[in-house]
Amino acid sequence: MFQKSRQSRHNRAIIAPWHDSEGVVTVNAHQLRDIIEEGENDRIEFKRCGNQPEKDLFETICAFANTFGGTILLGVEDDGSLTGIDPAQVLPVTRNVLNVVNNSNAFDVPVSMEFEHIEIGNRQIIKIDVPNSPQMHSYKGRVYERRGDADVVVRGSAPLAELCIRKQGIYTEQRIFEHVSLSDLREDLIDEARRLALAKRKDHPWGAMTNAQLVESAGLFGKDYSTGKQGYNLAAVVLLGKDEVIRSLCPAYKTDALVRQHDTDRHDDRLVATTNLIDAYAQIAGFCRKHLPDRFLMEGDFALSPRDTIVRELVVNCLIHREFTSPFPAKVIIDNEGIRTENASRASFEGPLEPDTFSPLPKNPLIASFFVHIGLAEELGSGTRELFKNSRLYTGRDPELEEGLIFRAFVPTIPAIQAVSNSPDKQSAQKDGIDEVASLALKLAESNGGVRTADLVDAGISRRTAQRTLSELVERDRLTPQGNGPSRIYRPNRR
């Protein structure tokens, strides 16, 4: 069984068979060790393998290609045990995989892959890297995608359509509705958009345009050159449409705003916004400001409201950077830890976003541009930087943003000093040089005989922070991990 042991010498004993003839550890051995220690997840899968691969290998290959790509280790058990493959069978197994993946009766659209053979003593591991594919793949008539550490069959027209949209890079906001007319849009909203644009820029060209010209200049009236259809598009409907038109053409669209500070099972207060994006922004932003404290700050001679900036960026992002054809309802949740948002996304990757390293990709460029014109958004990517800047001003803590099929954002509302002082184990944590999250993890591990990542998430800690904290406690020899994937539990080390 390959997993981190309590003492580092145990790790060395496991790694020893991977040394080459001169006693130098190869790069492949290090890479394999790191992958196995991470455990199975949305991008890593372990597969046993005898003389030929099993059927579920090809389901995983299909799922990885349809989602965000991933790595498969053939010759590794689910629990991380290194069983390996007979060296004489490595090439036949590799050929078998290639033959199946390129067989049109098995795979509809072959999947590209990279193979690497890693020696471990007298056995070998086959490492298969499957990149994210721009095409949709099926295996034996079924389409698979990766969700967590499972390969799931995509069923139903709506999920399949979402997958096609993500693969083809289609902007569904540009879908044309031939029978929507100017009378189906709210002209008072067009007037309000003109007023907001002129308030931002006195010489804005919308000031001299008729309503029809304004809508067309914003890209909300166009032509589908593949079909010849001409008319108002989905962006026009969700931005400026009457409520009954939005319900008819975009029935899944809504944003659910909740406060869960006292009644955590249900809610203390709730707002469901199903109207146009401009009014929905005003409703949800007002709801959030009502339930979040406003901390007075000065920058030079000017008063600042980090809260208002945080609310604006979170709500705008939730409204305009979403996939409107998805049935997943967008959520804005205020709880005792902070404010969270969730919305369906058309992502090209999955993982955390950092202000200095991420490359912003437009989800709905027409809608985003309209919000820029009326002063509720800035250039693409600026919102992330503003969130980090104002979250640090608001609480001294960083927000957490995670891209994926569901985009998730969290901004803490408890100041860093208060979060530490509220911890019942503050003195012990300070003595050991650990923070309040680590203190909570240790307390849960002691009282329950172990702690999982999900336990910390249930306690209001973000998954990313929980995973980082547990890894640090393992490095400090305070916890020992057992198992892999979602079932991994961290046991306390007796001191």
Image (cartoon, rainbow, N blue to C red):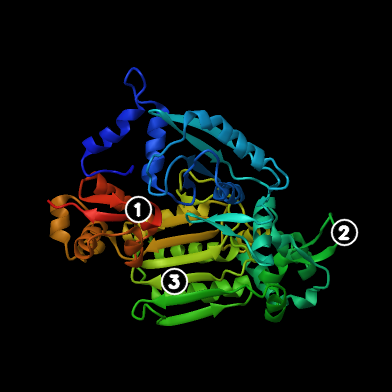
Q: Residues within 10 Å of mark 3 (few under 14, many from 20)?
A: some
* Quadrant position of the N terminus in the picture: top left
Q: Position of residue 435 (x, y in %)?
A: 23, 55
Task: Work out which residue is located at the far top of the displayed protein and give it.
Answer: 22
Amino acid type of the residue that numbered disc 3 sits on in the rendered structure: Ile
- The numbered disc on residue 228 is 2
Task: Read off the residue under disc 3.
Answer: 333
What separation in Å lies between label 3 and label 2 (alpha carbons)?
Answer: 43 Å
Q: Position of residue 113 (x, y in %)?
A: 60, 38
Q: Is residue 282 left or right of residue 464?
A: right
Q: Is residue 223 visible?
A: yes
Where is 283 relative to 165, above or below? below
Amino acid type of the residue that numbered disc 1 sits on in the rendered structure: Gln
Q: Is residue 436 left or right of residue 351?
A: left
Q: Position of residue 161 (x, y in %)?
A: 69, 61
Q: Is residue 29 left or right of residue 188?
A: left
Task: Read off the residue under disc 1.
Answer: 467
Amino acid type of the residue that numbered disc 2 sits on in the rendered structure: Gly
Q: Position of residue 41 (x, y in %)?
A: 45, 51
Q: Residue at x 65, y 42 (%)?
A: 100
Q: Nearer the viewer, residue 424 or 195?
A: 424
Q: Residue at x 68, y 43 (%)?
A: 110
Q: Secondary structure at mark 3?
A: strand
Q: Nearer the viewer, residue 188 or 122?
A: 122
Where is 175 relative to 389, above or below? below
- The numbered disc on residue 79 is none
Mark with earlier residue (1, 2): 2
